[in-house]
Amino acid sequence: MGQHCVDCLAESSRSAPRWRNVAGATRAGKPVIVPALIAVNVAVFVLTVVTAGSLNRNFDSPLFGLGALTPVDVADGQLWRLVTSGFLHIGPLHLAFNMFALWVIGREVEAVLGRARFTAVYGVSLLGGSAAVMLLSNPLGPTAGASGAVFGLMGALFVLLRRLRLPAGQVIGVIAINVVISFTLQGISWQGHLGGLVFGAAVTAALVYLGAGSPNRRQVQIASISGLALLALILIGAGVALV
């Protein structure tokens, strides 16, 4: 799926004005943000392994305990967990799966949206996943992983393909399979996955549809991204009130 979508999106982007992509940004060239995110995630994982003294039980690390998303701790004022949890992984397989998905999907989305807009999609998706966890998860259960943000990128890729009028059947299938897995396998945060998916799709839709053709498109995009980020924070606040 990865190589096929890269080629399709790159080809379709040529139909836009030469100096702008479909989101109104200058073309970014090779992905930069995606490799940087992967490097950070791997580095954090290595730190947890070293401090835990175990590869498969890296969640015993004090760093893991300080960074995982536990709603009761967030309600107690430990707000950093809303973000740090997206860079923690439980064991090497969890890390490998998420980083592979981030590479395959993320580089496509970054190539089309550009670096700044990609970062916005990733960040708001992460917040959206955390918001869903705060609202719908066990207040005492810790959650960790980049999958909320990765699901946001799945939603982003779907919106981009629709915007460019390219076949989206493969992406829909991947999303459907992963949603089913999220609900059927124990230990997976379906809340974080769905929250990230919805917010990632919403931010991308705002970027590629709102203000198109307007000289104020950048301002419209900034306002839209800010509004969705604020919505995620409001939902997080509601989750805090429910704890």
Image: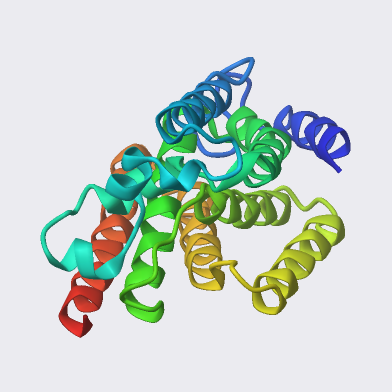
Residue reaching furthest left? 77
Relative placement, left or right, of 178 versus 72 is right
Question: Is 54 in front, or is 235?
Answer: 54
What residue appears at the point 79 percent right and 67 percent down from the top-left corner? 177
Relative placement, left or right, of 220 versus 153 is left
Q: Position of residue 114 (x, y in %)?
A: 52, 28
Relative placement, left or right, of 70 versus 20 is left
Question: Is 63 in front, or is 4?
Answer: 63
User: With respect to residue 134, does 79 lie above or below?
Assistant: above
Q: Position of residue 210 (x, y in %)?
A: 44, 54
Question: In the figure, residue 38 lies in which quadrant?
Answer: top right
User: With respect to residue 95, does 173 lie above or below?
Assistant: below
User: Is residue 121 visible to the viewer in this orientation of the structure?
Assistant: no
User: With respect to residue 33, does 126 lie above or below?
Assistant: below
Question: Is 222 in front, or is 41?
Answer: 41
What residue appears at the point 27 percent right and 72 percent down from the top-left corner? 235
User: Is residue 71 visible to the viewer in this orientation of the structure?
Assistant: yes
Residue reaching furthest front? 53
Q: Quadrant of the N terminus?
A: top right
What residue appears at the point 31 percent right and 76 percent down from the top-left corner? 139
Question: In the figure, residue 47 lies in which quadrant?
Answer: top left
Q: Quadrant of the C terminus?
A: bottom left
Residue reaching furthest bottom? 242
Q: Position of residue 233 (x, y in %)?
A: 23, 62
User: With respect to residue 96, does 185 lie above or below?
Assistant: below
Question: In the figure, residue 82 lies in which quadrant?
Answer: bottom left
What residue appears at the point 63 percent right and 28 percent down from the top-left corner? 111
